[in-house]
């Protein structure tokens, strides 16, 4: 129990900004350039486990691992359709679950991701509405869906599309969605062109 509690207190790496990674490097008395290097490993190279950051000294990797957890959602279930579409049920760090969908179409690939656990909008045509609303997703939980699906599919072989059409209303979690969009689109981050990202909304007024 004590070990699991200690693990739960660790900071998820996914979702960390450049500034947060620089601060983390400073806390460990690492040179400033290590923060930039961590950003590259985490987003450009898609490696969320610091033990695998081979350009870091072994001691630094172990220290980072002791303070952090990757933050990639666990795949709790999968459904496969006849056309190759794969729906993934993803378990978050607190046990809540969301869905992400991998959609192949010839040489095109699309992944549909969620922005909330459940949804507060209550659209009559939407199955998610029946679940009610639990909470917003954090930025790391949003982009973590891409990491989980990439690891199980051929997405990394394509310049794939991302659509926010899973669980939740993205504009009701605008702050975290905006952070996720930055990390996705940043050429030094995940490097996904903004032209390949669609945020679908039912329409939210101020």
Image: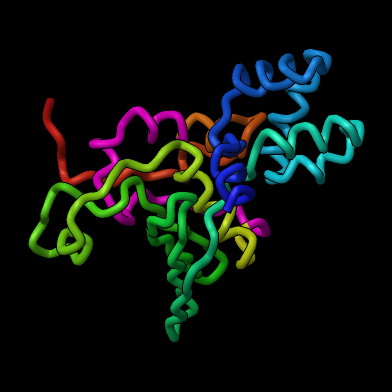
> Residue at point 29% right, 44% down?
135
| Residue 177 lies within the magenta run | yes
Q: Quadrant of residue 173?
A: top left
| Residue range highlighted in magenta | 156-180
The image's colouring method is rainbow
Q: Position of residue 120 (x, y in %)?
A: 16, 47
Outermost residue to the front = 2
Residue 127 location (% of width, % of height):
20, 66
Horizontal side of 167 relative to 142 (left or right) equals: left
In the rendered view, tell whether residue 69 sits above or below residue 186.
below
At 57% from the left and 29% from the top, the residue drawn is 16
Left or right position of 17 against 124: right
User: Depth check: 153 or 90 in front?
Assistant: 90
Outermost residue on the bottom side: it is: 82
Task: Tell me where residue 50 sits by quadrant.
Answer: top right
In this view, 57 is above or below 198:
above
Does the magenta portion include 160?
A: yes
Side of 74 where 165 appears, left or right: left
Q: Residue at x 24, y 45 (%)?
A: 169
């Amino acid at each position: 129990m004590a070990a699991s509690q200690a693990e739960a207190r660790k900071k998820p790496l996914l979702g960390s900004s450049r500034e947060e990674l620089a601060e983390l490097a400073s806390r460990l008395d690492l040179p400033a350039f290590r923060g930039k290097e961590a950003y590259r490993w985490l987003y450009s190279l898609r490696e969320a486990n610091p033990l695998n950051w081979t350009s870091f000294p072994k001691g630094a990797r172990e220290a980072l691992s002791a303070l952090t957890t990757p933050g990639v959602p666990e795949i709790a279930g999968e459904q496969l359709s006849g056309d190759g579409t794969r729906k993934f049920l993803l378990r978050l760090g607190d046990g809540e679950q969301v869905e992400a969908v991998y959609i192949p179409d010839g040489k095109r690939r699309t992944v549909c991701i969620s922005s909330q656990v459940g949804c507060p909008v209550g659209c009559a045509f939407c199955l998610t509405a029946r679940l009610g609303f639990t909470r917003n997703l954090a930025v790391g939980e949003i982009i973590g869906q891409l990491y989980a699906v990439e690891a199980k599919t051929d997405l990394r072989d394509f310049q794939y599309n991302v659509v926010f059409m899973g669980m939740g209303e993205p504009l009701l979690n605008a702050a975290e969605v905006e952070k996720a969009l930055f990390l996705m689109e940043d050429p030094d981050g995940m490097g996904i062109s903004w032209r390949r990202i669609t945020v679908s909304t039912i329409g939210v007024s101020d």
